[in-house]
Image (spheres, rainbow, N blue to C red):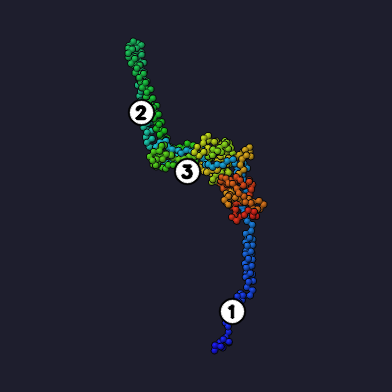
């Protein structure tokens, strides 16, 4: 049995599969074909993406000089619209408000009634003054009757004294009596004039209860209401108003700016100015320097400059913010700065610098720029861009230097 197992049995240890036979025939080639297919598909996808993306379409804007009409800006500053004539109208007396006839935004004329105050006490004082004046005046008539009688008596005494009937003493007494009555009449008449003056004071007190506009303008603030107490001086804490309404002469609006004293030499009276309201950044308002206030603010190191608007407009309102550019004339323009204005959206940050994209012959060129003051929706560029250059507005993040673009 053992022998038969030794001679007739199979040697199972010899049954072994070669490692080279584990990989199917031709498997390496199939893997190479699969990799090539993936690469080809990626290339096709990239090509399709490039075709789909196409040439970027951009919007451009022309850089323009910082001053209108090609004028060059010597200096930029900011300030506010202010009126030369502005008044908070107050009452001359302390009284209670009965009626207010104006509201914010209402135009008023010179002398127009703004409000009425309680004049009951003033009316009573006026009646008392007139009554006293009339009573005093009534005394004049009584004295004039007595004077007429005294003058007749004086004439009789003169006749009697001439005939030798009356004595000189009687004549002197008659003359004294007549002169005394004349003096009394003169005194009473002076008292009547004094009473008339008192009546005038009482009339003025009544008139002070009517508050009128000192000049024509627009009501910009209503400071008192019916039933409140008003006074020309601050009294009674928060329970007493000092003003009725604030009026602005809209025809006297001008621009007031503070100019750094280091640059005030660039500003002269009559100089042309380009003004841009913060509320209307695309609207350029022509103006000119009216005066340079001859004093400086030592804390801010600035000098106040007042600028007159060439033409007023209903859109211009008091206390609006405004940015101005002081323009150079032809003689000074050659030596002035060549700053230009571009849209704010054209400037972006790249590598820590301000850059813009300029389009030339359908190709964009990235330029580093120096940015100055903002002017509404635009910004001043002092270096890197010249007037007339076409800059890309809101450039896409994928835009690169030297890339070809289409202008919308």
Outermost residue to the bottom: 1
Quadrant for the N terminus in the image: bottom right
Residue 135, disc? 2
Residue 119 found in image quarter: top left
Q: Residue at x 59, y 79 (%)?
A: 16
Horizontal and vertical percent for residue 355? 59, 50
Q: Position of residue 191 (x, y in %)?
A: 37, 26
Q: Position of residue 113 (x, y in %)?
A: 45, 38
Any part of residue 60 in sight: no
Mark 1–mark 2 distance (CA, rounded to whole Å): 153 Å
Distance in Å between CA atoms under marks 3 and 1: 107 Å
N-terminal of the pair, mark 1 or mark 2, is: 1
Check the image and report above or below for 18 versus 150.
Answer: below
Residue identifier under label 1: 16
Residue bearing the label numbered 3: 104
Front position in the image: 196 or 373: 373
């Amino acid at each position: 049995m053992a022998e038969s197992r030794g001679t007739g049995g199979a040697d199972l240890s010899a049954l072994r599969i070669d490692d080279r036979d584990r990989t199917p025939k031709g498997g390496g080639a199939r893997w190479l074909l699969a990799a090539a297919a993936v690469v080809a598909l990626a290339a096709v996808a990239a090509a399709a993406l490039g075709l789909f993306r196409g040439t970027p379409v951009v919007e451009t804007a022309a850089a323009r000089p910082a001053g209108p009409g090609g004028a060059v800006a010597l200096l930029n500053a900011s300030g506010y619209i202010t009126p030369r004539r502005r008044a908070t109208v107050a009452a001359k007396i302390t009284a209670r408000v009965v009626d207010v006839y104006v509201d914010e935004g209402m135009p008023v004329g010179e002398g127009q009634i703004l409000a009425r105050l309680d004049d009951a006490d003033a009316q009573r004082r006026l009646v008392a003054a007139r009554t006293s004046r009339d009573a005093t005046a009534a005394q004049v008539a009584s004295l004039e009757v007595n004077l007429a009688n005294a003058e007749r008596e004086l004439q009789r005494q003169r006749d009697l004294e001439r005939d030798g009937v009356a004595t000189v003493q009687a004549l002197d007494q008659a003359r004294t009596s007549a002169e005394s009555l004349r003096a009394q009449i003169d005194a009473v008449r002076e008292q009547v004039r004094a009473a008339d003056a008192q009546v005038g004071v009482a009339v003025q007190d009544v008139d002070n209860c009517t508050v009128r506009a000192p000049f024509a303008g627009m009501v910009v603030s209503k400071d008192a209401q019916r039933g409140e107490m008003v006074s020309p001086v601050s009294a009674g804490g928060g329970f007493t108003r000092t003003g009725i309404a604030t009026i602005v002469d809209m025809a006297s609006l001008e621009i007031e700016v503070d100019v750094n004293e280091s640059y005030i030499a660039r500003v002269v009276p009559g100089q042309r100015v380009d003004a841009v309201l913060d509320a209307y950044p695309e609207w350029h308002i022509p103006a000119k320097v009216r005066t340079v206030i001859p004093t400086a603010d030592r804390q801010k190191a600035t000098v106040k400059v007042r600028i007159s608007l060439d033409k007023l407009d209903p859109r211009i309102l008091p206390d609006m913010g405004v940015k101005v550019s002081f323009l150079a004339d032809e003689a000074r323009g050659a030596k002035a700065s060549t700053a230009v204005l571009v849209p704010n959206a054209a400037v972006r940050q790249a590598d820590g610098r301000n850059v813009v994209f300029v389009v030339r012959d359908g190709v964009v060129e990235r330029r580093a720029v120096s940015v100055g003051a903002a002017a509404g929706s635009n910004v001043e560029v002092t270096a890197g861009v010249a007037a007339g250059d076409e800059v890309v507005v809101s450039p896409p993040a994928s835009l690169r230097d030297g890339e070809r673009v289409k202008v919308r």
